Image (cartoon, coloured by chain):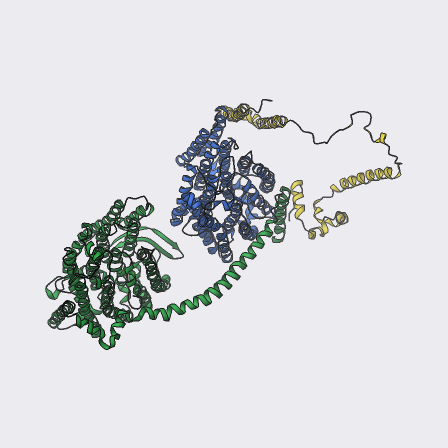
Chain colours: A green, B blue, C yellow
Amino acid sequence: MESTLRWIVLIPLIGAALNGFTVRMMPRKLAGIIACSAVGISFLLSVRLFIAMIGMDVADRSLHDLVYTWISFGGIQIDVGFAMDQLGVIMALVVSGVGFLIHVYSIGYMAHDEGSNRFFAYLNLFIFAMMMLVLGENLIMLFVGWEGVGLCSYLLISFWFNDEANAAAGKKAFIVNRVGDFGFLLGLFVIGVNLLPHLNPGEGLFAFSVLQHHAHILAPAATVIGLLLFLGATGKSAQIPLFIWLPDAMAGPTPVSALIHAATMVTAGVYMIARLNFLYVLSDTAMLVIAIVGAATALLAATIALTQNDIKKVLAYSTVSQLGYMILACGVGAFATGVFHLMTHAFFKALLFLGSGSVIHAMSNEQDMRLMGGLRKKLPLTWPTFIIGTVALAGVFPFAGFFSKDEILWKAFSDGNIWLWITGFLAAGLTAFYMMRLVVLTFFGKNRASDEVKSHIHESPLTMTLPLVVLAVLSIVGGWIGIPHFMGGGNHFEMWLEPVFNSSHHGAAHAAAAHADHAAEVAMEWTLASASLAWALIGISLGTFIYMKKIAIANAAKRFAGGSIYKVLLNKYFIDEAYEKAIVNPGYKFSNGFLFKIFDKVIIDGILVNGSAFVVAVTGSLLRLFQNGMVRFYAWGLFAGVAMFIIYLQLAS
Amino acid sequence: MTANLMAILPYLVLAGGALLVMLVDSFVKSMRKDHLSNLSLLVLLGSLVAQQFTQQYSSDLFAGLLATSKFTFYMNTLFVAIALLTVNYASSLYSRSSSFSSEFYPLILLATLGMCLMAAATDMLVLFIAIEMMSMAVYLMVAGNRKSIKSVEAGFKYLILGAFASAILLMGMALLYGQTGSTLYSSFAAVSSSGGLMTSLAVGLLLIGFGFKIAMVPFHMWTPDVYDGAPSHITGFMATGVKAAAMAAMIRIVWVLIPQVSVVWAPLIGVLAVLTMTIGNLVALAQSNIKRMLAWSSIAHAGYLLLGLMTLLKPTSDSAVLSVVADNAGGALLFYLLAYAVMNLGAFGIISYLAKNRGEEADNIERYAGLSRTRPLVAASLAIFMFSLAGIPPTIGFAGKFYIFEGVVKAGMIPLAIWGVVNSLLSAYYYLRIIIVMYMKDPEESSYKGSSWETAFATSVLAIISVLLGVIPAPIRDVAVAAFKSLGQSG
Amino acid sequence: MVVDRRDFSVNFLIALLITNKELASRKYARLRVIYIWFDAGEAAFMAEQFVPLLLVISLALIFALLFLGLSYWLGPKKASKLKKTVYECGIPVRGGIEIRFFIRFFLVALLFLLFDLEAVFIYPWAVMYQSMLDGGRMIFALSEMGVFVGILVVGLVYVWKKGALEWQ
């Protein structure tokens, strides 16, 4: 029992309540300080538990905090409680740590915004929901957190709701996620139905420990459960086919993009798969589907990112692509590696988003890269940190991204499916390329903005640049805790997480162990690592070369094959349009034509609602006639009742 | 003797307090009645404290006339809490208006004493005296607004019909006495095993007598007129306290007489439960006066209570199953009494809060328009109470209904449970209408505006309790089940 | 059903519940005619000793009605104004019969009734008093009555201070 856990979750909620209920009265600075300290305290408590956990035996590294039993009837018991193990503590540290930095950044970024108090309330609420998601001790708590972050995401995407487009983006994110959540819920039902008859008294249905203990019972349904839950993950973690909401979600303020749509919320799907690893390893089919979806998403999103002009859109597609890597890692059974990439990605992608926020801030809210350029000198702190983030994302040794991404590719390779590796490898090169395109267009060359904007360009305040520096440092050193064995590192990260995933002797780990020739394997690892480093460097230099020196090549490429390829990429493979045609329009027609006009208007409103209301009203008015206010009549009624009792007694006996 | 007196110390405090308040009222001449309300609050708190400190449980006080147990502890706490809130609501009203006479204060203390004794009585004579003590006080309190014809008329109606009900109740008691030659509950157990038409008739008449108090169809007809006419805070007191007291006495008697009662009356109670909730809800739909609406809704809630009672009566061959089902059903009933008290007192508190000077009543639903704008806290509280009354989670009303229906299902009477749920749905319509008026309509010139902060504070606390116990009902429910079980032990 | 004939009140109630079937039994055969005439099979509770009483009452009623009817039928009827006046004493009635009393009368009557009735409760105590003294419980007996009278006194004081005893 460790009651600190509940406070880690609840303190951000208290912060949200403080700011939320006094939204008009609270001085702005105080609101920022409250929000930051709430998350800060949460972070410090997480660190405390982390340190305590390091001091424990491996077997004891699992903290529980049962708050109370929420539901208990008919054999179903669901507790409200929190649990923290090796995986949970990593997630808690990432969420509260990165979250804290982004909160600090937001003080500067939102300083001139009218609704900054509301903003901080939402942000804290988000941290609360996210903490509930990663520290909940059962799937229901996870689901509550899951929906909670979805809600906050919606609120924050359409934070500037006066603009129609923002509101639409928020709705899109919400509705697309509903599709995924539907799958998730179905998955929960399947688990419940299968597990319920086998539970012992006192065991919470859906509790992770119970699920793990009874995993063998779920084995026959593992594929169905796995795929249904994964549908939820494709929604939240923006995978094919539900990734379309994430780029639009960039309509929200940039700190939101960094926190929710890059570092934390979108990794919820990865966390969920990693958390339920014991279920997923039971189904090879589900794992294969996950791996394929992950790899395909990584490549698809990377190609789209090549052509986008909005700085945040490029980063958004990059996020989708990187999430694809994490999912791929989970799909090949390398859950620890997936979580590793999740963490490093949180560092450098938050850094990149915050950096882009700093750029946008400097450019008076301009987001189109074609109107930027030459910001290198104007933004002396933003630009080097941005470069660090870029090389970390591109996967250059020894930055954080290298270790985690390389590990994923190696695990995919050693899993035996060469196509997964090739897809991932291709995407890695593209990543380096499009990131250099972004950097060059933004920071190098001449400034293409209007004179008016130019005159306003300035470096951001300290509250904004300080988080950049911290994240830059983390982007450099963050990967070092997971240096693989063949490079002489200890791979501490994977060892730390091993007890959580020890049931999953599957995929990569298994295949790697099966390799008879250890030396040959190490050689292979070296080869692949060098290849991906070289590939990243090629991508970087090509990107630099083309966009700095020979822009003609890029233009020629645009015209290649009659410009059709460029057009397809620029329009994101027309996926939005396809969904519109195939799903949204027919759905709308069906809803409007049948559900609304016939089912709703005629059957529900006409017959069920008004019809029953009519019957009820008539009966009610009839009964009112008895209520005539005459005492004599009432007394008569009373004795009629007595007579009724006596007659009943005569009949009954 | 001393032990006996110690055990009934909470009752003695109430009785002595009532006399004291009477004396103070007659000697201290003052326009404002704050001293009386404060004194009454002190007396009630004193009774609560005495209750806490003299938790002496004995089934054989004064040669078996009274029995104290966890059951009486639970019920008495409820009654005194209800009285506390009622006095709280009343105090601001009585200090402002001359239409209310100060007799209210001793009367409510005596009524509370009567209710406590009803729960504790294990002898029919004590029970009858307790019922009359409560009823007489309530008749007067109903007619408490002496400048309102409606109020006086309501008091008169209630007095006349209540006298009839008392007569019927007394008839039942006489028959039981005829059978057993004793008025002690403990002597009923012997006769109940042999059964007989006369015993059944006697119990039936008792059920009618109590059914009148809890507004069971067809003995409900007085309810809308009286609830409407009485001052709001008194209505709240009646709807929660009187009902709970009658229910407590009924549970005690039914539980003692269960073997032959269950056989004969259970089906009729089931039918009446269904009728009560259905008629209550149907007529409530057509009301435009919030007090009348709540009166009908309280009839509907009596139906849910009867459903719980029905579960208690349900004969089951397997005695082990019976006792478990009965424990849960009894616990559910007691929990429901508490839940209903919290939400209904809250609602009536707000109605009495919104009433202006001179004893006017805030009963027109249309004039609640825009309350969310002018009094956001009060509107939110009232919304919570309405949600709770409609049984929408996560409120205490939901938890209460859930436990009742759970018991009904466990006793194997699924159609009844379904009908109960359908009724809940039906009731949502008229409860939510209030919320719509408060939140969706703009405030108008004629909209009500309250001003008493004590009442607003008390109702907000009740609203918080409604939600809190809706989220975490289990601990209180455990207490309720334990209270009910203690009844079985002490007879 | 076992009918206990010793207790009339119980018999009466059972009578409400008894069925015709019982009436048809041989035990009551002799009385059947009378009961059917009463159109209340439920009257079967009556034991034979009540029959003479019933006959006496019936005869009395019949004779009384008979002679009253005869005198009404045979007597001459010549009404005049003088005949309709009040005979010899009394004064002619004026106005309605709903005479208003001063409300104070009611109040005093109520208070009298109240305290008068309370005094009735002292009797049982007085009956038990000697035995309580014999049992050595004098203190208890006295304090019991003390409490009772005390409550009455509080009531009296209340009534007094509230002005219910003042005529104006």
Q: Is residue B313 left or right of residue A626?
A: left
Q: Quadrant of residue A435?
A: bottom left
Give above or below for B29 relative to A474.
above
Camera-nearest residue between B72 and C84: C84
Q: Quadrant of residue A591?
A: bottom left
Q: Is residue B98 left or right of residue A407?
A: right
Q: Position of residue A69 (x, y in %)?
A: 35, 52
Give above or below for C10 relative to C130.
below
Tell which residue pokes out farthest to the front in this image: A451
Camera-nearest residue between A220 and C147: A220
Q: Position of residue B380 (x, y in %)?
A: 41, 46
Q: Is residue B255 left or right of residue A542?
A: right
Give above or below for A639 relative to A498.
above
Give above or below for C156 relative to B347.
above
Tell which residue pokes out farthest to the bottom in this image: A561
Q: Is residue A164 visible?
A: yes
Camera-nearest residue between A473 and A468: A468
Q: Position of residue B360 (x, y in %)?
A: 52, 38
Q: Position of residue A418 (x, y in %)?
A: 20, 74
Q: Is residue A416 visible?
A: no
Residue found at x 40% / y 51%: B394
Camera-nearest residue between B91 and A142: B91
